[in-house]
Amino acid sequence: MYNLVRYNLVPPLFLVFFTGITQWLVAAGNPDRQFSISCLLLPGSLFSWTVVFVFLLWSFLSLKVPAKTFLGPATPAGYIPAYSANGVQYYLISLAAYLATVLAIPSLPVTIWHQFDQIISSLNIFSLILCIFLLIKGHNFPEVPEGAKTAPLLYQFYAGIELHPRLAGVDIKQWTNCRAGMMGWAILTLNFAIASIQLNGFKLGPIVNAFLINIYLLKFFYWETGYFNTLDITLDRAGYYLCWGCLTWVQVFYTFSAYFLVAHPTKVSNPGAFAILVFGLLSVLLNYMADYQKEKFKVSGGECSLWGRKAKFIPVEYKTHEGKTKKSKLLISGFWGLSRHMNYVFELMLALSWSLPALGYGNFPFFYFGFLLILLVHRTFRDDEKCLAKYGEGWREYCKQVPYRMVPFIF
């Protein structure tokens, strides 16, 4: 039954539901828009295709300029992916280029907001074509012969075949997930904040929303090379789930609170918005401190102090793809002794903070917070499954020492 649901039912249901709901979200965030089935057939406009083409080309070329190379973890077949390590420079230059464009074309933010349905249509079309290309590539000219080709064809399209496909020397997942997906999120939230000010006058709420999201994304690009060790990169393959998700779903869903605030002026006072800003910055700080503790522990080989005490750990062993046995350490001090994913709690706090400027308009602006909650809870189970397979009895002992997945004493 599990395999039937996973391989035969989930792909078509998710493809129809998530692809279709993108235009519903555009209408839900703007009362001047009415959703109908015909919205799903929009071909895009000249403006939307120009915006999409320029941005995707810009993000692609960011991975072609000379930069330091970062090597990711080896795949089970021994393939070692190479990535471009210039994330912060790309983020800052991209924001500067966007703001310079707005200075030259002041009407751009409102035009993007007005034509957001067409932009999402263009992204939908491009992303689906890219996923078809990845399916064909995975079957006919993969980087290495380790693709998942035994599942039903629709599942291959949905989940992807290759772990690290490349196009013209560019890692496709770094392009779609990081350079297009995350940067698009950053620019669109800033764009909608400017559009809100142009249409509704100055209010602190939309600025707090855009600022907190961009602080979070600056942290992401600062840590971009660390992202290449996460499940998105090491376990998930390049298909609809990841590539369409980052190119289209992130742009329409992750930006929803900012988009919503253009047509729904914030009801939160400026002092209230400042309080939200403080809460959001605290969440960022806690998230950074959790990541810093793990990085400090890793760099020092476990010989460090956390919260004034010598760091404790569980020694574990695992086998490489070559069959060699290696030793590692699992941190059980600091934030990482409170729960196995305390960093997820801080991410949820941050997601709540940038949704709060739309307080007073019901549940719609909090869609992303609810989605992230489900996503991260699900990810804790996926992480347990992966780590149990990797570390075996060592992971079981770790779970005894740190019994809570996310929220101490609750979950």
Image (cartoon, rainbow, N blue to C red):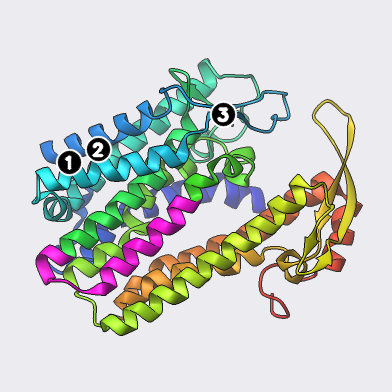
To which residue does mark 3 refer?
164
Q: What is the CA distance from the residue labelled 2 to the residue labelled 3?
A: 24 Å
Q: Is residue 256 visible?
A: yes
Amino acid on which disc 2 is placed: Val
The foreground one among 19 and 82 is 82
Indicate the secondary structure of the residue bearing disc 3: loop
Residue 396 position by quadrant: bottom right
Query: Percent from the top left, x then y, of residue 195?
Result: 16, 60
To which residue does mark 1 refer?
48
To which residue does mark 2 refer?
52
Is 30 located above or below residue 239 in the figure? below
Query: Percent from the top left, x then y, of residue 114?
Result: 13, 55
Residue shown at the point (64%, 32%) measured from the top left: 72
The main secondary structure of the magenta stretch is helix
Residue shown at the point (91%, 53%) measured from the top left: 393
The answer to whether residue 127 is left or right of residue 385 is left
- Point out the stretch of residues depicted in magenta: 197-219
Is the C-beta separation of discs 2 and 3 under 8 Å? no
